[in-house]
Image: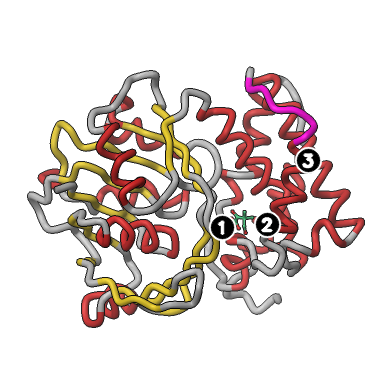
Amino acid sequence: MMHVLVVGAGAMGCLLGARFAMAGAHVLLLDVDVLHVEAIQRHGLRLIELNGDEKIVPIEASFAPVPSKLGADLVLVMVKSYATGEALRLVHSQSITPGTVFLTLQNGLGNAEKLADLVGPERVLVGVTAQGATKEGPGVVRHGGVGPTFFGSFSGFTPPNLEKIVNLFVASGLEASYRQDIDRLLWQKLCVNVGINAITALCGLTNGQIPAMPPARLLCEAAVREVLRVARAEGVRLDEDELDHVLAVAKATGSNRSSMRQDVEGRRPTEIEAINGAVVRYAQKHGLSAPINWTLTQLVKIKEGTYGHGTD
Ligand code: KPL
């Protein structure tokens, strides 16, 4: 039996954890949201399927630290990008074995690097998922959309348990595969988050309003063009089709409030540094500038700075 520790039981962590548990894995969800964890401990996780059917999935959940000697085969890292270090400190060292693999499916760039510093590059997998989910309240998660999950090694090493991990996703009814070109897929996902998240957060738009409103669309395209230039300098091959892809994702997720908009509206820190901020840092690395992403980054930071100050 696979032992899986999900660090960060937000919408996606719960969705994947629930699916793995339903496929027979032993899953432990770890989160800092006391109400959410207590609801799962008391009643199980309520999962609302795509067709509206509801299931109660009995699943272990804990705040922290993780009970020792879990012996995890897989640690799924799903916390917000800025919280990785803090979250992993809550994972008891005895839960980790020499074979434990850490898979990050977080937004933005820099997550695998942070994980590799903490646990060693040879056991890190990095990936992207097109699955969609929303947390509707404590202990309640709605599956919002299906799509493939891709992952690859961070460092060129082939981590242990790779086949078991792919098989777990597939046995859980989740399309997943191991990819050699994971860097390109990460930058493609970055284009989507760069083009949608900050603009929707700053302007209070749904994703679908970006392609529908010409000024929002122009700003989105300008931000994504900067990513394409920086990616080229970094040796990652992306082409102009990415612009159409970003607008297509915005349309397909039209009624969504992006994760960054939800964070800003909930007055929580955002992932701006791992998304638009990362574009600025990679641009600087190559002697380029990325003024649109720099401006979006500063505006979101100003917004974060207003929390609790009664200025909005
Ligand atoms: O990943 C997303 C996010 O909100 O972070 C998108 C694809 C933009 C969907 O809302």
- Badge 2 crowding class, 10 Å Cα cut-off, few under 14, some 14 to 19, many 20 or more, is many
Write down the quadrant of residue 139 in the picture: bottom left
Kindly identify the amino acid type of the residue bearing the numbered disc 3.
Leu
As measured in the structure, the alpha-carbon distance from the residue carrying label 1 to the one carrying label 2 is: 8 Å
Residue at disc 2, secondary structure: helix
Question: Is 143 located above or below residue 197 in the figure?
Answer: below
Q: Mark 3 CB in 8 Å range of ligand 1?
A: no
Instruction: Determine if the magenta segment contains residue 28.
Output: no
Please state which of residues 64 and 153 is positioned toward the viewer in this rendering.
Answer: 153
Write down the quadrant of residue 20 in the picture: bottom left
Q: In the image, is 120 to the left or to the right of 234?
A: left
Q: Which residues are magenta?
A: 236-241
Kindly identify the amino acid type of the residue bearing the numbered disc 2.
Val
- Badge 1 crowding class, 10 Å Cα cut-off, few under 14, some 14 to 19, many 20 or more, is many
Q: In the image, is 285 to the left or to the right of 90?
A: right
Q: Mark 2 CB in 8 Å range of ligand 1?
A: no
Q: Residue at x 39, y 78 (%)?
A: 54
Q: Residue at x 57, y 65 (%)?
A: 263
Write down the residue under mark 2: 300
Question: Is 51 located above or below residue 85 in the figure?
Answer: below
Q: Are marks 1 and 2 in contact (CB under 8 Å)?
A: yes
Write down the residue under mark 1: 270
Helix, strand or loop: magenta stretch:
loop
Write down the residue under mark 3: 243
